[in-house]
Amino acid sequence: MATQAVEVATKRKGLGLRERLDVGSGFTPYFLVLPTIIVIVAVAGFPIVNSLWQSLQSNPLSPSSNFVGLQNYAQVLGK
């Protein structure tokens, strides 16, 4: 009985990580990173926007606070 030779898949050398992970050009990489960017903006941006909004309130800890605009900043600066 004769046995047949089986070819073993050889590892292709010379391909870098970029070539092996190439998923195409265009917007695909941006769509893959988009969820991470949304989370980072939400985690970093919400506290900043919220603190700016609270600084424009008359008493931000009270449930019945009024919008006073830049009056708080003028009072702190002494004008």
Image (spheres, helix red, strand yellow):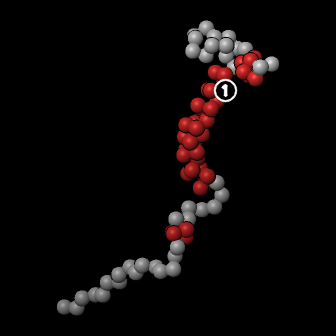
Q: Residue at x 56, y 42 (%)?
A: 40
Q: In the displayed structure, does residue 39 sit left or right of residue 66?
A: left
Relative horizontal placement of residue 38, taking residue 66 as reference (left or right): left
| SS state under label 1 | helix
Quarter containing the C terminus:
top right
Q: Is residue 67 above or below residue 34?
A: above
Image coordinates of residue 65 in percent, x first then y, are 63, 11
Q: Residue at the location (24% across, 88% down)?
A: 3
Residue 70 seen in the current view: no
Total of numbered circles in the picture? 1
Tell me the kind of residue under disc 1.
Leu
- The x, y position of residue 70, in whole percent, is 75, 20
Residue nearest the viewer, comparing 63 with 20: 63
Q: Nearer the viewer, residue 23 or 65?
A: 65
User: In the rendered image, which residue does mark 1 sit on?
Assistant: 52
Residue that appears at 61% across and 52% down: 30
Tell me if residue 59 comes above or below residue 37 in the rendering.
above
Name, please, the residue furthest toward the right.
79
Query: Where does the image place residue 31, in percent across and percent down from the top left?
Result: 59, 50
Would you call the spot at circle 1 few (<14 residues within 10 Å), some (14-19), or many (20 or more)?
few
Res. 28 image quadrant? bottom right
